[in-house]
Image (cartoon, rainbow, N blue to C red):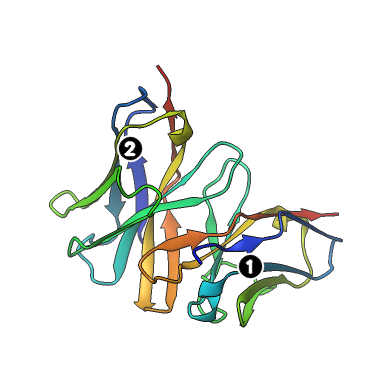
Amino acid sequence: QLQLQESGPGLVKPSETLSLTCTVSGGSISSSSYYWGWIRQPPGKGLEWIGSIYYSGSTYYNPSLKSRVTISVDTSKNQFSLKLSSVTAADTAVYYCASLHSPDFWTNWFDPWGQGTLVTVSS
Amino acid sequence: SSELTQDPAVSVALGQTVRITCQGDSLRSYYASWYQQKPGQAPVLVIYGKNNRPSGIPDRFSGSSSGNTASLTITGAQAEDEADYYCNSRDSSGNSWVFGGGTKLTVL
């Protein structure tokens, strides 16, 4: 059974780069069955998809964040990572990683999710 | 359009049936998935595909779709169903994913 766990700094200074890692257990990140994704939730607000990556390295980013986001996979560590540059207070949120299933182009779902990690942008 | 629209809040009497809807152009092409989120917890998948429930999700949860609207129905709502519910699908381009704004369900 897949399990995901986010890790990384809980406090980032404005203008710096937010870096988070998601460690996958119970399955291989190289599996062709899954994409891997990052989703965030500002305090008291809704969910926002940040981006997704396939094991081959193909990436998909939220157009509103694309210029600042990089998602990568480290197959040797069974991890995938998120980098968000030039952060501001508006990037303060709980960041979740999740497995994205897409058995066909029309059917997609995120499951399971990590527990989430709060990242605060403040000086 | 890359947007999915949900009613911000819905209420239901205990034991009654409630439908939570999600509207968007992309839903004419792609199935929605639905997530339940309780305070302080990560979202949990409750419905995916045409109408599929993950293991452990009660059968009072069901999904349907018509035109540009996807629906999550809870038949016989329980107190523990009080939560925020989010829909998700690919956007119309097919190269991004988008979440609805969420619906806060209150069980009276």
Q: How many marks?
A: 2
Could you tell me which secondary element the residue under label 2 belongs to? strand
For the point 47% across and 33% down, the residue is A90
Residue A19: x %, y % from top left: 28, 36
For the point 52% across and 50% down, the residue is A47
Disc 1 designates what residue?
A: B22
Residue A74's place in the image compared with A56, above or below, is above
Q: Chain of mark 1?
A: B
Residue A47's place in the image compared with B29, above or below, is above
Residue A105: x %, y % from top left: 37, 78
The residue closer to the viewer here, B41 or B27, is B27
- The amino acid at mark 2 is Ser
Q: Quadrant of residue A33?
A: bottom left
Task: Check whether the beta carbons of the residues at disc 1 and disc 2 lie within 8 A of each other.
Answer: no
Residue A67's place in the image compared with B103, above or below, is above
Q: Residues within 10 Å of mark 2 (few under 14, many from 20)?
A: some
Q: Residues within 10 Å of mark 1 (few under 14, many from 20)?
A: many
For the point 32% across and 50% down, the residue is A66
As drawn, the label of residue A7 is: 2
- The amino acid at mark 1 is Cys
Q: Quadrant of residue A119?
A: top left
The residue closer to the viewer here, A66 or A107, is A66
